[in-house]
Amino acid sequence: MKLGKKASLVLGAVVIVAALVVVGVFYSRQAGQMGDLNDRMDRAEILLPGLTASKNNLEDQLVSAQSLLEASQAQFPASVESIEYGEYLFEIADECNVKLDSLSFPKPVAKRVGLVTYSVVSLTLPVTGTLDNIFLFIDTIRTDDRFASTQVKTVSMNAGGKATISVDIYGYQR
């Protein structure tokens, strides 16, 4: 079957128009996607400086928190060594002119405070001396760097120059 010249031209024009329509539809879709991508990129560029500043701020906070953690850990001994603390207590008692009547170290117990677990030794310190010297002994334990991780819990005193002091010594468990 032979087509006429006109029919061939019309058929060719229809094919060309159909091809142009298909190309136009694809181009339109691509242009829409490109517009969406440009919008998303513009929003990302707007957010980027704020996110970068937030990231830097969080990194600074992390460094600060790590430094604070290291400083806090330095205050707490890794373990509570009874011989060392016994020597310190007798040394302080001697310097404060009080007599430490007895000293025994119980086994440390674990105590959890928030996310941190401490090794705690609870001591009872019976001392004899003048009231002024007993107060000096208590104050020295509270302020001495070797006892920075120590908490004076209770003090029982009588007028006869005897006192019983309860303290907790905290050690940081890693």
Image: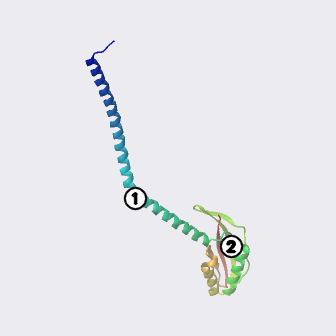
Q: Position of residue 9 (x, y in %)?
A: 27, 21
Q: Position of residue 43 (x, y in %)?
A: 36, 51
Q: Is residue 135 left or right of residue 1?
A: right
In the rendered image, the quadrant that contains the C terminus is: bottom right
Q: Height in image: 29 above or below 92?
A: above
Q: Height in image: 44 above or below 167?
A: above
Q: Residues within 10 Å of mark 2 (few under 14, many from 20)?
A: some
Q: How is the image coloured?
A: rainbow
Query: Which residue lies at the image location 42% right of the left edge and 57% below the top edge?
Result: 51
Q: Quadrant of residue 150?
A: bottom right
Q: Nearer the viewer, mark 2 or mark 1?
A: 1
Q: Is residue 91 left or right of residue 70?
A: right
Q: Quadrant of residue 30?
A: top left
**Which secondary structure, mark 2?**
strand
Q: Position of residue 57 (x, y in %)?
A: 45, 63
Q: Position of residue 137 (x, y in %)?
A: 64, 83
Q: Nearer the viewer, residue 171 or 166?
A: 171
Cα distance between the residues tagged 2 and 1? 56 Å
Query: Which residue lies at the image location 39% right of the left edge and 55% below the top edge?
Result: 47
- Residue farthest toward the left in the current orientation of the protein: 6
- Image mark for residue 123: 2
Query: Which residue lies at the image location 60% right of the left edge and 80% below the top edge?
Result: 143
Q: Say what amino acid the circle numbered 2 marks.
A: Leu
**Which secondary structure, mark 1?**
helix
In the rendered image, the quadrant that contains the N terminus is: top left
Residue behind mark 1? 49
Q: Say what amino acid the circle numbered 1 marks.
A: Pro
Q: Height in image: 24 above or below 63?
A: above
Q: Residues within 10 Å of mark 1 (few under 14, many from 20)?
A: few
